[in-house]
Image (cartoon, coloured by chain):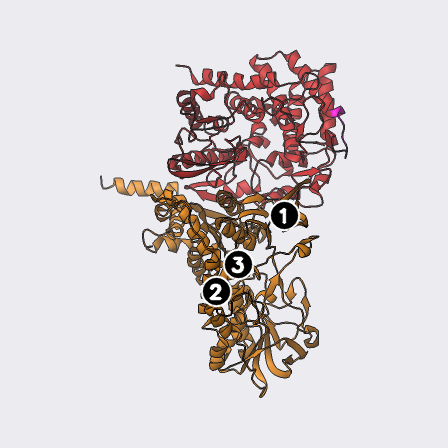
Chain colours: A orange, B red
Amino acid sequence: MITSVHSDDYPPGDLAWRALVANIHPTAWRNPTYAGRYNLLIIGAGPGGLTAAREAARLGARVALIERTLIGGSRLNAGCVPSKALIRTARLYAEMRCAQNFGGEEPSDPKFSFPEAMARVKRIQARLSRNDSAQRLSESGIDVYFGDARFAGPDSVLVAGQILRFRKALVATGSQPVIPQIPGLIEAGFLTNETVFNIRSCPRRLMVIGGGPLGCEGAQAFCRFGAHVVIAQSDPMFLPKEERDAAQVLSDALARDGVEIHLNTTVTAVRTEGTTKLVDLLCDGDKSTVSVDEILVGVGRAPNVEHLNLEAAAVVYDRAAGIRVDDFLRTSNPRIYAAGDVCLDHMFTHAAAASARIVVRNALFMGRKRLSALTIPWCTYTDPEIAHVGLYVREALEQHIPVRTFTILMHDVDRAVTDGEDAGFVKIHIKSDSDRILGATAVARHAGEMINGISLAITSGIGLREFSRVIHTYPTQAEAIKMAAEAYMRTRLTPSLKSLSSRWLSYFD
Amino acid sequence: MESDDQLLDRFQRAAFGYFLEQYNPDNGLVADTSRFGAPASIAVIGFALSCYPVGVERGWIKRTEAISRTLVTLNFLWSSPQGEQPDATGYRGFYYHFLDMKSGQRVWHSELSLIDTTLLLAGVLTASMYFIEDTPIENAIRERADAIYHRIDWEWARDGGATARQGWKPDSGFSHNGWEGYNEATILYVLGLASPSHPLPSVSFDAWTATYQWENIYDIEVLYGGPFFVHQFSQAWIDFDGIRDRFMREQNSDYFENSRRATHIQREYARRNPCGFEGYGKDCWGFTASDGPGDNILRIDGRERRFYGYAARGAPYGPDDGTISPCVALAALPFAPELALAALRHFCKRYADILTASRLPSGFNPSLPGGSPSGWISEGHFGLDQGIVVLMIENYRSQFIWNLMRKCPYIGLGLRRAGFTGGWLS
């Protein structure tokens, strides 16, 4: 992440860097002069803040949007956009290595330029920042302020020396990486998702702390770039919130790429010897030490609730769980709402945007939209990807909903086989004695794309039976969903129905 | 041609021979594998204690010899050191997974293992159900067995949680691992719930089964468990045919039927052979926790292949490195006899060199270059493999172990406390 507009992380002549800065925090920007109370004042110009600002402005509201550092939030600057751009390059490199599987020949010495890959990341960030540049936001009627926002009272905020008053406010300040309390870690130095996109060379040996989405994506990408990657995960499996079998497939995939896996393992200390970082591990009482050049921390994210002076606005919050909101996303101060990472369990760009839309309706138009009514899918962008929507089986059983799961292995899906991408599965969970879809997990090369169809079905109340009637393009990997529906329909053919059918057919013999 | 029964008798006796050979007469311990220097495994001892009665019934060992072996073993288990010291044999009534064959002390920094202690206890109770003559020596066997069971502190093993933990170590405490999803732990909960001294609460079984997942895979409805052995270990001692807990009542199935279906999934996976490994087919399957060729990456016929050492292989989710475990296919005999027998005859015909005097190895891998179509063959033999082969062939031939354990009051009590009803429990 570019942490400051004065950063010298990239050469001043770098066009992509200059274009990006010009969009997300122009150096010559002058804050507007406050001219009266805002209908909606938004703190944080990440995905949630931007969505709310545009939506409210479009509906005719007077909107203030305050950003501390860079427009775009984690998505653009330290999360989805740069990581997916880098993962794409890593995938290319991995595919070069297995060219023989496709009748090609692996380049004898595949050349890979890490600085060039990072420059590509910056170009992509610059391109995607155009739509939400400060200038364009301003042109669409939004007052964009840069500076630290602090509540001055229950209906006012102080920013860059001005007091701004509001009828309603939205706090959408996002989150930041959690830094684990490991002795020696800070002294030794480490990377997070906010700094990893600034490095200029690929570390030869990399320790990844944390086997959640961030850790797994990072471990696989850097391993594919040629780093020797060691990953330590305190739980017995990766992605502990996901299905056991998904974690198993991911574990196999990481091992196949060459990642050194340490599950059920905690990092107890970090030391340095010269430029080498020595990381002490503990697994079931057994101690070991690994030597690496860099450490990437990906153990989770914490809400950004500090320095907002929330107390002055009587907004109740918790440092770990974030701002407390009700199902309408209203805080303890009825004028003030929250959206996105700062208040949600699901810390995703699309969840931030969806919750921000709810806030616009509820705050400005007396809406009664509920957070709990949202169907929020998510995806971990490893290879294969792991995507989920709706309930997990354990959640359904906790709610005393009986569940049946229809599983299609990707090795039974023609397009997955033709593409050499047949690792993984699609599991669709339905309520027993019905075809109501409760949730689904997809583990596949393009699982993130595939899960959208199931999200649509859940949101629209479409049952699994309907999927069997929808003609899917052949061959596509999303056919796995239709195949699950067909498997469901086959279970509907009870012995008595089959007997009836046979008797009917024999009538014509 | 050798009849099915003759064939099975030959393989069962060969497997039984493992326990005659790998036994220390001084303390009753049985080696984990036949490899030089292998430690004892407490689970393998449980299988040994269960196999001795089979051997007596089949006439492969004299009753007096079986009694002697059993009592030596139980005396050791009862009198060996229990405590927090790192080289004890056990703690809180549980035992460490691996023990030195001579001293019986903990080795390999192994964990105090709940499931392996359970399998040991299953063997201890099998002995107590078989040796029921009113003689001083058989009385001693039953008294020792009861004392060993009484000493196990199942309540402690929950560590305050809803379900039992998987293990404990003196220097790091309980492992993070709990029991999640269906696996071989059914017998653990049955014996834990029936404990006469420190029972698990019945809610612990409910909490575990709440993590189950009922799936339709390859058009087969099944309670999925990964490695195939999870469908066999509890079933080696308990006849689940016709008895059902709440979960199985809801699914209109039982754990016997479930193992049959799991067998079909194993075979279906091999027929599909998605990774294109050598040998796989309708009569060549068996994916479970087994020995493997070792951690290695090789390019074979233009494809990069990754191989593993000892690993929990499974179908259809993997991992799959081309390794086949013939023992686990044979042990499916009670559930799917046609499939298991066809597989056994195929192994004998196509891969005869995997056999050592009719004894099957832990695994072989035809995809790796070797001196024959079998490719890589696991060295020596593993006690767990031989034990499950002896018990499952016996259950297929006579239901001897199942009938014996039906009479075990602890098994009946534990099953009822877990909510099982119907069938022979009625």
**Label 2 secondary element:** helix
- Residue A203 visible in image: yes
Identify the element where label 3 is drawn.
loop
Disc 2 + disc 3, Cβ < 8 Å: no
Task: Determine the CA span between mark 3 and mark 1.
Answer: 29 Å
| Residue located 45% across and 65% down the image | A124
First in sequence: mark 1 vs mark 2: 2
Q: CA distance from mark 2 to mark 3?
A: 12 Å
Q: Is residue A263 left or right of residue A123?
A: right
Of residues A486 and A250, which is closer to you in this image? Answer: A250
> Nearer the observer, disc 2 or disc 3?
3
Measuring from the top left, give residue A265's x and y in whole percent: 63, 45
From the top left corner, tell me how far across and down residue B34 is, in percent: 58, 21
Q: What type is the residue that disc 2 sits on?
A: Lys
Residue B266 image position (x, y, % from top left): 45, 35
Foreground residue, A196 or A395? A196
**Residue type at the position of mark 1:** Ser
Secondary structure at numbered mark 1: loop
The chain to which mark 1 is attached is A
Q: Which mark is residue A127?
A: none
Q: Which residue is mark 1?
A: A234
In primary-sequence order, the first of circles 3 and 1 is: 3
Residue on which disc 2 sits: A122
Quadrant in the rendering for residue B270: top left
Q: Which residues, given as a range, are shown in magenta?
A: B78-83
Q: Main secondary structure of the magenta part?
A: loop
- Residue A445 makes an appearance in the image: no
Q: Residue A415: x percent and y percent? A: 35, 49
Residue type beneath disc 3? Arg
The residue tagged 3 is A200
User: Which chain does the residue under circle 3 lie in?
Assistant: A
